[in-house]
Amino acid sequence: MSGDEVLIPDDKAFISFKIECCSDEGWSLTYNKTGITVLIQILEEEKSLHKIKCRMVCKDVAAETMYDVLHDIEYRKKWDSNVIETFDIGKLTVNADIGYYSWKCPKPLKNRDVITLRSWLPMGKDYIIMNYSVKHPKYPPKKDMVRAVSIQTGYLIQSNGPSSCTLTYLAQVDPRGSLPKWVVNKSSQFLAPKAMKHICKACLKYAEWKQRHNPGYKPWLYPEQNPLSSIPLSELSIQHADSLENIDESSLSEGKDERAEHSDDDAPN
């Protein structure tokens, strides 16, 4: 997104996102194991700016279930081990809202957070959820967090039949700061594949969990259920990366406990 005007993505934006998810031309493959591939596009190496694309086939997960799991904010708090805090701020349309998300970064880096405009669209048997960063006057950057910028982040869910789907995660995020090379490498070689596996496992347990937690409540499918107050677009502005504090963490070394966790998680189950 360019300029300062906040725009709600139209059909062209969703189609463009799907094309980028499906085309691997100009991307470098960095990981290919157990049905998960990770690709990287380096944009500005000195600023740690890159795009990452992860793709995974989930053989026992229907596309509809994956879509529900990625939307369900209460369930995310249960399965997403990286989440610190996440909540919805307000709605814009029946398929667009504003939300807050903060997450743990590998030690000793500072944790990050974002305010994003999220939008979603079913496209036949496929689904797209995508977001980009905005500013909201009531949610300025916090002292104990680094406000990151999602330039464009999202998921493409493609149905492979009644009980199988392919999930593609595409992200261009400015983490605000000069990150050490090990962070980018760890993201593509370890953190991204681990996150994809967590999502797939969460999908397998979702039906049982949802039966016990407000089973009929799915405002992403039934907009009339959405309790959020409407936010006028005029309250929002684009979150430009250059207006935020730039943190130099390039000289930091990976913590010992992080390296131990890495080796444990990568071991065969």
Image: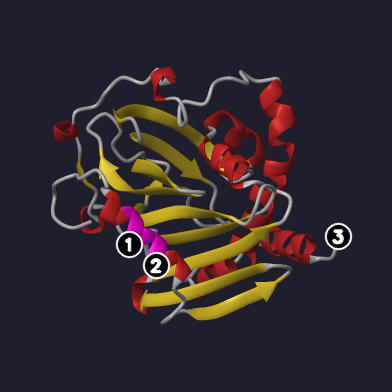
Residues at marks 1 and 3 touching, judged by CB atoms closer than 8 Å:
no
Q: Examine the rendered structure and indicate whether residue 32 appears above or below residue 165.
A: below
What residue is pinned by disc 3? 269
Report which residue position mark 1 lands on: 16
Q: Residues at badges 1 and 2 in contact (C-beta under 8 Å)?
A: yes
| SS for callout 1 | helix
Going by the numbered disc 2, the residue's amino acid type is: Glu
Q: Is residue 15 magenta?
A: yes
Element assignment for label 2: helix
User: Amino acid under label 1?
Assistant: Ser
- What is the distance, in whole Å, between disc 1 and disc 3 at their CAs? 38 Å
| Gap between marks 3 and 2 measured at Cα | 33 Å
Which stretch appears magenta?
14-20
Q: Earlier in the sequence, mark 1 or mark 3?
A: 1
Where is residue 190 shown, x and y percent of the image? Answer: 64, 66
Q: Using the image as rendered, state which of residue 71 and residue 265 is in the foreground.
A: 71
